[in-house]
Amino acid sequence: MENLSIVFEVVKNLITLNLAKVQRHEWEIFQGYGFFALVVFLSLGLYCYWYHLYRSEKKGERNYEKYADLVLKDDIDDSVLESKRSA
């Protein structure tokens, strides 16, 4: 619990722009918790994006195999993959 109080104290000092009050070991604790939170956030974001891609392909909204074939069939005369409506 002491580390969390240090983290909240550092956040308070960051908000009030009082950086001279923050000591080196407090910054290290803050960076450790911040790194852990960033890794968790990015992992959740990655899995949410993967689920979105999986769900949209299963619903039939997108066919990602067409996009994979685009790399192999990339000529000027090829057909358009999707017709977009104009704004």
Image: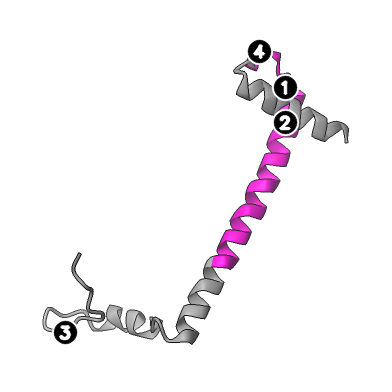
Which residue is denoted by mark 1 in the rendering? 24
Seen in the image, is 41 located left or right of residue 67? right
Q: Earlier in the sequence, mark 4 or mark 3?
A: 4
Q: Are marks 4 and 3 in contact (CB under 8 Å)?
A: no
Residue 5 lies in quadrant: top right
Decide which of tag 4 and tag 2 comes sooner along the chain.
Answer: 4
Residue 81 at x, y = what percent? Answer: 25, 81
Label 4 to label 2: alpha-carbon separation: 15 Å
Q: Secondary structure at mark 4?
A: helix
- The location of residue 20, given as percent across then percent down, is 66, 13
The residue depicted at 83 percent of the width and 33 percent of the height is 3
Predominant secondary structure in magenta? helix
Where does label 2 land, which residue?
28
Answer above or below: position of 80 versus 6: below
Residue 69 is covered by the magenta coloring? no
In the displayed structure, would residue 31 be above or below residue 41?
Answer: above
**Residue at image mark 3:** 78
Residue 43: x %, y % from top left:
62, 59
Residue 59's disc is: none
Front one among 54 and 60: 60
- Its colouring scheme is one colour
Q: Earlier in the sequence, mark 1 or mark 3?
A: 1
Tell me the residue that label 4 is attached to.
Answer: 20
Mark toward the viewer: 1 or 4? 4
* Label 3 neighbour load within 10 Å: few <14, some 14-19, many 20+: few
Q: Secondary structure at mark 1?
A: helix
User: Label 4 amino acid?
Assistant: Ala
Q: Which residues are magenta?
A: 19-48
> Sequence-wise, which precedes: disc 2 or disc 3?
2
